[in-house]
């Protein structure tokens, strides 16, 4: 396997593991919200644990905190946390009643729509990837799959 194939495999494997973690995190946080009787408290705990974990990663792997004065970054690039917050709060709120599987399936459908839009127009600094007929067909099949999965 050449270097490019190896890195592609590594990226795919890491993202597969991240994808596996999303419904596990959703189920854990939803149940924590039930036990604490507050999706807000459960989400705050999740973010606190995540902050501690990211700081450990920052200082052990990267070694130091960068100086933010050296960056010329548009403010909207810092707003990803708002989307994470909305996701975590909505999962903690919806999953206990709607089901983790249903919630994650519709999250996946939303991700597919956003991914196709971001790629098609090269939004937010992403490389532009045209939405070909084959990609549209794949997205339609995945959307149909989502509806089959949530159908009881």
Image (cartoon, rainbow, N blue to C red):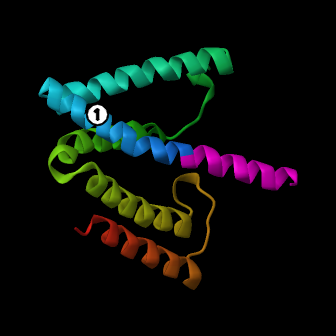
Q: Nearer the viewer, residue 69 or 45?
A: 45
* Magenta residues, start to end: 1-16
Q: Residue at x 22, y 46 (%)?
A: 95
Q: Residue furthest front?
A: 152
Image coords of residue 110 (percent x, y): 36, 61
Q: Nearer the viewer, residue 119 or 133?
A: 133
Magenta stretch: helix, strand or loop mostly: helix
Q: Is residue 66 above or below residue 138?
A: above
Q: Is residue 7 magenta?
A: yes
Read off the residue under disc 1: 29
Query: What is the total number of numbered labels drawn onto the structure image?
Result: 1
Q: Residue at x 41, y 66 (%)?
A: 113
- Horizontal side of residue 1 vs 54, given as left or right: right
Q: Residue furthest right?
A: 2
Image coords of residue 91 (percent x, y): 26, 44
Whether residue 12 appears in this view of the structure is: yes
């Amino acid at each position: 396997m050449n270097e490019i194939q190896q890195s592609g495999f590594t990226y795919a494997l890491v993202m597969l593991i991240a994808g596996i973690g999303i419904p596990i995190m959703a189920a854990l946080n939803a149940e924590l919200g039930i036990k604490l009787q507050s999706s807000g408290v459960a989400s705050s705990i999740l973010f606190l644990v995540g902050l501690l974990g990211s700081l450990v990663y920052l200082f052990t792997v990267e070694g130091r905190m960068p100086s933010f004065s050296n960056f010329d970054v548009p403010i909207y690039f810092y707003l990803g946390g708002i989307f994470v917050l909305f996701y975590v709060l909505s999962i903690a709120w919806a999953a206990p009643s709607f089901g983790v599987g249903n919630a994650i399936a519709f999250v996946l459908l939303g991700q597919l729509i956003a991914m196709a839009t971001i790629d098609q127009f090269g939004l937010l600094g992403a490389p532009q990837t045209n939405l070909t007929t084959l990609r549209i067909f794949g997205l339609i099949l995945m959307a149909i799959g989502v509806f089959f999965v949530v159908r009881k």
